[in-house]
Image: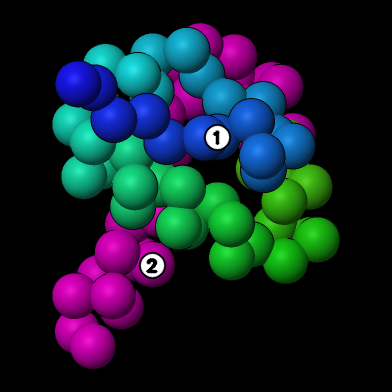
Amino acid sequence: MSEEVKFQSLNLQISPFIQDYSIELQRDIYAYLSQLDDIHRKAYGIAYEHLGTSFNIARSNGFKSWKNKQSSN
């Protein structure tokens, strides 16, 4: 049975390529996106809109910084 992260509940545009990531990375991305405040959600939306399919949340500076902070705790 395949697990699925419910990204649609975030009301953000999500790349269809995210389904190719491991379930662990999907969970991390979901956790990161769900904690964004309004300003950062808007910035994410602009980045996604401007970069389209070349936008990779897992390679973004914001996600990397958040991930490092999570690892430190």
- Given residues 16 and 56, the one toward you in this image is 16
Read off the magenta span. Answer: 46-73
Question: For the residue marked with disc 2, what is the amino acid?
Answer: Trp
- Given residues 53 and 13, the one toward you in this image is 13
Residue 1 in percent (x, y) is at: 19, 21
Q: Residue furthest front?
A: 1
Let me know if residue 13 is in the magenta part: no
The quarter holding residue 4 reads top left
Q: Measured along the vertical axis of the image, is residue 50 above or below residue 24?
A: above
Helix or strand or loop: what does disc 1 sit on? helix
Q: Viewed as shown, does residue 20 lie left or right of 63?
A: left
- Given residues 6 and 29, the one toward you in this image is 6
According to the image, label 1 marks what residue?
Answer: 7
Question: For the residue marked with disc 1, what is the amino acid?
Answer: Phe
Q: Measured along the vertical axis of the image, is residue 12 above or below residue 50?
A: below
Q: Residue furthest bottom?
A: 73
Disc marking residue 20 = none
Residue 23 in percent (x, y) is at: 23, 36
Magenta stretch prevailing secondary structure: helix
The quarter holding residue 2 reads top left
Neighbour class for label 1 at 10 Å: few (<14), some, many (≥20)?
some
Helix or strand or loop: what does disc 2 sit on? helix
According to the image, label 2 marks what residue?
Answer: 66
Counting residues from the start of the chain, the first of labels 2 and 1 encountered is: 1
| Mark closer to the observer (2, 1) | 1
The quarter holding residue 45 reads top right
